Image: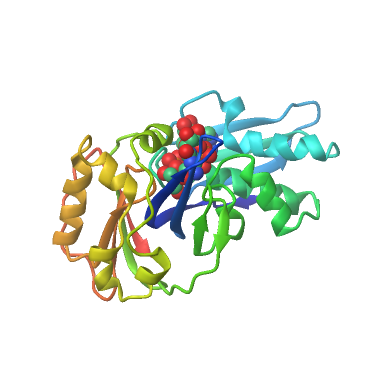
């Protein structure tokens, strides 16, 4: 089975509280971004163990601990009838970019395994497996715009119509660890609830919606402010860091991006939400 795990964007992100388990509570809107990897899952050849073949963007770490393999093995522990699998992942989405690419691969592995082998797992059950693999992994099970709270793994419905919006995502080839980013934050409640700010036209968001990671990381990584500035200079209606970075995106509500120029080592995606 061939699937295309997509990235996500965070629209507003407030780290509201440090939790007793060491994690943080947050308030953020998660949006699916149609920038994808390609992943194939097949039963392994007879006598072969579960393995993964990786192509495209290099993924740090031992392939045996790749989130796709961990997701498959998580289901195998509860469904011993699952045979060893051969996974092929062509990695396109930048890693450690605040785009949730690894979490998407894991969640899509769960969904595809459920379908391919007829496990009969419900959406809720797939979400519980996903939560065990990473805080933002559960979002990719339903993969629709939501207001995420708690650890970013509990979702509330939100009315948001961004279909047709032009989006540019700029990744400056800078890996920021999520744990390091959280360590730089002093949690606090937002001045205005995100749901309320999002109800206003996009042109107002520049003054009302922010990402706590952007505020905390920009002094150490001024390149983030430079990218945002160029997106606004090209006419973006709204621009922000996604998640804990380092990808910065711009949205054009009802116009098209003007000319932009980026260093050769950057990766830039442009498309429609
Ligand atoms: C910041 C966010 C915002 O959407 O996205 P990314 O920038 O990673 O895409 C997420 O909260 C990232 O979720 P995810 O990448 O799944 O994090 P996890 O693997 O669960 O945790 C990595 C580390 O981040 C910290 N962490 C993560 C989630 C959370 N709610 N509180 C935390 O403090 C912990 O230090 C944890 O050890
Ligand atoms: N399939 C995968 N794709 C991307 N990263 C993976 C994958 N499997 C494991 N990882 C590990 O997950 C971490 C980053 O995950 P990713 O979801 O891309 O980050 P972020 O949510 O910050 O964009 C990296 O340390 C990487 O080594």
Vertical placement of residue 138 versus 196, above or below? above
Q: Nearer the viewer, residue 141 or 209?
A: 209
Q: Nearer the viewer, residue 218 or 98?
A: 218
Vertical placement of residue 76 versus 153, above or below? above
Whether residue 55 is visible to the viewer of this picture, yes or no, is no
Q: Is residue 91 left or right of residue 215?
A: right
User: At 29% from the left edge and 37% from the top edge, which residue is drawn?
Assistant: 173
User: At 35% from the left edge and 41% from the top edge, which residue is drawn?
Assistant: 186
- In percent of width and height, residue 167 lies at 32, 62
Q: How many marks?
A: 0
Q: Is residue 52 left or right of residue 185?
A: right
Q: Nearer the viewer, residue 25 or 47?
A: 25
Vertical placement of residue 158 versus 39, above or below? below
Q: Is residue 100 left or right of residue 107?
A: left
- In percent of width and height, residue 54 lies at 53, 33
Whether residue 257 is visible to the viewer of this picture, yes or no, is yes
Asked where in the image residue 196 lies, by quadrant, the reply is: bottom left
Q: Single out the residue that lies furthest toward the top.
A: 62
- In percent of width and height, residue 161 lies at 43, 75
Asked where in the image residue 49 lies, by quadrant, the reply is: top right
Please name the colour scheme applied to the rendered image.
rainbow
- In percent of width and height, residue 261 lies at 16, 51
User: At 45% from the left edge and 46% from the top edge, which residue is drawn?
Assistant: 17
Quadrant (top left, top right, bottom left, bottom right) of the C terminus: bottom left
Q: Nearer the viewer, residue 176 or 22?
A: 22
């Amino acid at each position: 089975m061939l699937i295309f795990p997509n990235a996500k964007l965070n629209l507003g992100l407030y780290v509201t509280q440090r939790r007793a388990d060491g994690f943080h509570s947050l308030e953020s809107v998660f949006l699916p971004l149609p920038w994808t990897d390609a992943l194939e899952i097949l039963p392994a050849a007879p006598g072969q163990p579960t393995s993964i073949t990786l192509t495209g963007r290099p993924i740090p770490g031992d392939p045996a601990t790749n989130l796709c393999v961990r997701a498959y093995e998580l289901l195998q522990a509860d469904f011993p009838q699952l045979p060893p699998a051969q996974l092929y992942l062509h990695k396109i989405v930048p890693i450690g970019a605040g785009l949730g690419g690894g979490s998407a691969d894991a969640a899509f592995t769960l969904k595809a395994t459920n379908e391919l082998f007829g496990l009969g797992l419900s959406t809720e059950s797939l979400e519980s497996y996903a939560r065990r693999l990473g805080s933002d992994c559960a979002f990719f099970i339903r993969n629709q715009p939501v207001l995420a709270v708690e650890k970013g793994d509990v979702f509330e419905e939100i009315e948001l119509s961004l279909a047709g919006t032009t989006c540019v995502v700029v990744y400056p080839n800078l890996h920021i660890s999520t744990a390091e980013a959280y360590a730089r934050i002093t949690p606090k409640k937002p001045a205005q609830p995100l749901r309320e700010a999002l109800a206003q036209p996009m042109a107002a968001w520049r003054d009302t919606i922010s990402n706590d990671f952007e505020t905390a990381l920009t002094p150490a990584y001024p390149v983030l402010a430079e990218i945002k500035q160029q997106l606004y200079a090209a006419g973006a209606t709204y621009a922000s860091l996604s998640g804990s970075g380092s990808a910065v995106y711009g949205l054009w509500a009802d116009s098209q991006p003007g000319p932009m120029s980026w260093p050769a080592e950057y990766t830039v995606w442009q498309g429609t939400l």
